[in-house]
Amino acid sequence: MNIRTKVKLSFVVIIALLLFLGGISAVITYQIKENSSFRENISSILLMQEGMNDIILESTKLGDAIKLEQLHTEFGVYEKNFEDLRSILSTRAHTSIFNAIIANIREDKVIQNYLNALYTNEHRIELMYDALFNLEREKLDYVTIFNALYPEENRARLEIQEHLLHKNQLGLIKALSDLRYYSKETLYQHGNEATLQKWLIPIDILLHATEHEKEGDLHANLLYYKEVVGIIAEKAISIERTKVIENETITEASNVLDENKNVSIALEKTISKLSNEFVDQMRVIQLFVGLGTIVFIMLLSLKVSRNVSLSMDEVEAKIEEGLQEVNALNQEIEDTQKEVIFTMGAIGESRSRETGNHVKRVAEYSKILALHYGLDEEEAEMLKLASPMHDIGKIGIPDRVLNKPGRFDEEERAIMDTHAMLGYEMLKYSTRPLLKIAAIVAKEHHEKYDGTGYPDQKKGEEIHIYGRITALADVFDALGSERVYKSAWDDEKIFTLFHAERGKQFDPKLIDIFFKHLDEFLHVREQMRD
């Protein structure tokens, strides 16, 4: 084989290696999209189960059969959508030669166990709702009969009362008083068999006392009244029994929802771990193939330099061309890794209906503050990549709180404030430097310089510089952006607040840096508007 043929074959091999690198990039991109879609479907399942739980709670408060049927239809839609998602999640991904070396989230056994737990809980919610729906329909029937009979019971009791008061007999009046007292106890207080029996005692006393009366129809009225009492008391007791079952069902549904939240946190930890392993695998594959390509190009250049009258400049040019191709592919991988981090951060923000540009602007603001504060370029870049995950803990916050328009009440505020620790718990187990920084940011970006923040009430420089920087960047962008619970503030209002909160909510040095380099922040905001 002559040298010309060898050179041609060598270039064919180089092209094949470069195509292989491109193929790896394509597989990586596909896998990222696949895993991202998988996470979104898991989040949708959790949201559906929260919606089902809300329907269970609302069903117990209705007094209208039409609205109950509407809720039943809505629950059925949730069930159908859940089954559709379950079918999607249960479908195995397409098998390829890369599956052996690249992590596939949906095929992980731990993930499958967590999903099975979610499926089991969803089935429990369905069974609870089916039982509750039938119970609520029965309760509405009881209430309808009760409401129809109560005026008749009241009329008959007043008629008996009028007859007995005319008799002016102390024993009968006492029995009447007991009758009136236990009627209220049975119908509106206790609603049990024991109270009903106490109600029947004075009725029987009055029946016995009037059974030999020849004049008037008091005895007949008492017999009729006792018959009405038996029917209406049965409905009252049934209604109370229904309320007890309702409370038990609501408690059980709440417990299931709590279990789902714990499963959600565990899922996020597992997904984070698999994502880290995925990034490491990408680097190893890229490194070996890239090194192999470089070595092959170098060997080829030596071979050609000995046997072909090519100038050294021509050889170097070809090597440089190959290196540039490898570097370009390397840059594509790094850009893909950054996109993974931004996507994870955007998941938390998207649940609160905020735009993806929010996390990107916060990232840029954080880097500007870090550089002017004195952090070196590498550390500032790491903070820029980590800061988009500051609100990742919002994944664990219910939609009814997260997307509530207007101010939170105390209970809702306490729930919302847990998102800092939820984010920290998701990320703290990682050994990756970037995710360690993200864990600090998630936990401390709501601490205040004067010690009035949360979750640990740290103050001053006890708060990590990453938390202090991200806090300022996040608040600046949040105040200037429209949210579900507020309109965007104008700049002067924001600047007035920052001056007022210097040394209180914010690090005074960072506030000074912010105003000194204000034009840089405004430029970033203008370039990245929603």
Image: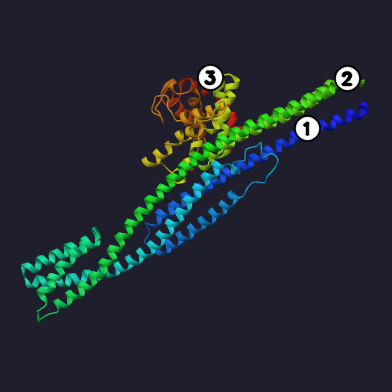
User: Where residue 102 sits in the image (x, y, percent)?
Assistant: 65, 37
Q: Is 497 located above or below residue 94 in the figure? A: above
Residue indicated by mark 2: 305
Q: Indicate which label's residue lies in the foreground, 1 or 3.
A: 1
Which quarter of the image is occupied by the N terminus?
A: top right
Q: What is the x, y in percent for residue 283?
A: 66, 29
* Helix, strand or loop for disc 2: helix
Does residue 151 appear left or right of residue 481 in this picture? Answer: left
The answer to whether one can see residue 89 in this image is yes
Kind of residue at badge 3: Tyr
Helix, strand or loop at mark 1: helix
* Residue in view at x 73 percent, y 29 percent: 289
* Callouts 1 and 2 close, C-beta under 8 Å: no
**Foreground tag (2 vs 3):** 2
Residue identified by numbered label 1? 17
In the rendering, at what x and y percent does residue 12 appear?
84, 33
Q: Residue furthest bottom?
A: 214
Residue at 52% in and 21% down: 513
Three-letter amino acid code at disc 2?
Answer: Ser
Q: Say which mark, if any, is on residue 373.
A: 3
Question: Picture quarter containing residue 163?
Answer: bottom left
The residue located at (37%, 56%) in the rendering is 61
Q: Is residue 310 above or below residue 46?
A: above
Instruction: Decide which of 217, 493 is in the foreground and name it.
Output: 217
Q: Residues within 10 Å of mark 3 (few under 14, many from 20)?
A: some
Inspect the image, locate mark 1, and give the three-letter code of the amino acid beneath it.
Leu
- Quadrant of the rendering where the C terminus is positioned: top right
Residue 437 in the figure: left or right of residue 184:
right
Residue 446: x and y in percent read 45, 30
